[in-house]
Amino acid sequence: MSEAVAITSRDNPLLKELRRVAQDNIAYRKAGRYWVEGDHLCSAALQRGQRPVVAVFAEEYWPLAPVEYAQTAIKNIVIPKKLFVELSGLESPTGVGFVLELPVDVAMQTGVATVILDRVQDAGNVGSILRSAGAFGFRQVLALKGTAALWSPKVLRAGMGAHFGLHLIEGASLDDLKALQVPVVVTSSHHGDLLQNLRLRQPCAWAFGHEGQGVSPELMAQAKVHVRIGQPGGEESLNVAAAAAICLHASSLVGQ
C-alpha cells in the first residue's frame, strides 16, 4: 500500500492538475486521465479492475476509507476538506476521488451490438444511455463528433459506473460506421415501423440523435431500419434517454 502524502497548499502542482481534470469537461483528452468521485463510482471502478493513478482523500474521510481504496492506488494523497470541496463537482462531497488512466488505442469492434450517439449533447442523457447500454447487453458505444464528452465528470456521474463495463469510442464519423458490419437502426418520432412490430436482426447498432434535431439526415440515409415508438398518450416525442432505454430493452428481448 502506498503511504498517504499530505498536501495543504492550494498551489501544489498536483492539485492544480487535478482541478483541471475534475472541472474541465475535455481536459481528460490532453491529460490522458479522468476523475471520478464518491464511494459508488470509486467502488465500481475497483470492481471492474481499475487501478487509480491517484486516490484523493479529504482529511476527515481518510481514517474511514475502505482499506482497498488505498491499497489499490499507486499514489494516495490527503488534503484539507476545503481543498477537496474546491476539487469536487458534487453539492455534498463525500471526501474521496480517483484519478484513472484513460483507455488508449481503443479500436472499433465489428459484428457486435452497438449504440451510436449522434450529437447527443446533454451530459445527463449521455450518461443515462450508457447505463441502458450496459444493462441491456450493448457493450460498445460510438460517439459521433458533436456528442458530449464521454469521460467528462458530468457524464461519468450520470453513467453511475457504466463506463467501466463498456467499450467506448469518441469522435467517430459516419464513414467509420461502415466498419461495424451490423445493420444500423435509427429512431424517429413520426417515421418508420412501430417498435413492437419489429423482429430485429441481432446484433445491430441503435442510433440515437440530438435532443432537438434527432438523427442527422445523413445517418438516416445510411440506416437499414427506421423505428418509431408508439405513444398512445399523444405526446409528440420522448426524451432521447427514455427512448433509448425503451428501444434497447425491446431489442434485448429478441430471441428470448
Image (spheres, rainbow, N blue to C red):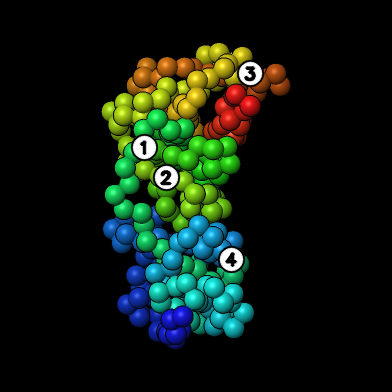
- Residue 132, quarter of the rendered image: top right
Nearest-to-viewer mark from 2 and 4: 2
What percent of the width, then of the height, locates residue 83?
A: 48, 77
Comes first in the chain, label 4 or label 1: 4
- The residue type indicated by label 2 comes to His
Question: In screen coordinates, is 149 left or right of 65?
Answer: left
Distance, label 3 to label 1, CA atoms, is 28 Å
Residue 166 visible in image: yes
User: Residue under circle 2?
Assistant: 167
Distance, label 2 to label 4, CA atoms, is 23 Å
Check if mark 4's residue and mark 3's residue have beta carbons within 8 Å. no
Q: Which mark is residue 109?
A: 1
Badge 1: how crowded within 10 Å, few (<14), some, or many (20+)?
Answer: some
Q: Which mark is residue 35?
A: none
User: Residue under circle 4?
Assistant: 39
Distance, label 4 to label 3, CA atoms, is 39 Å
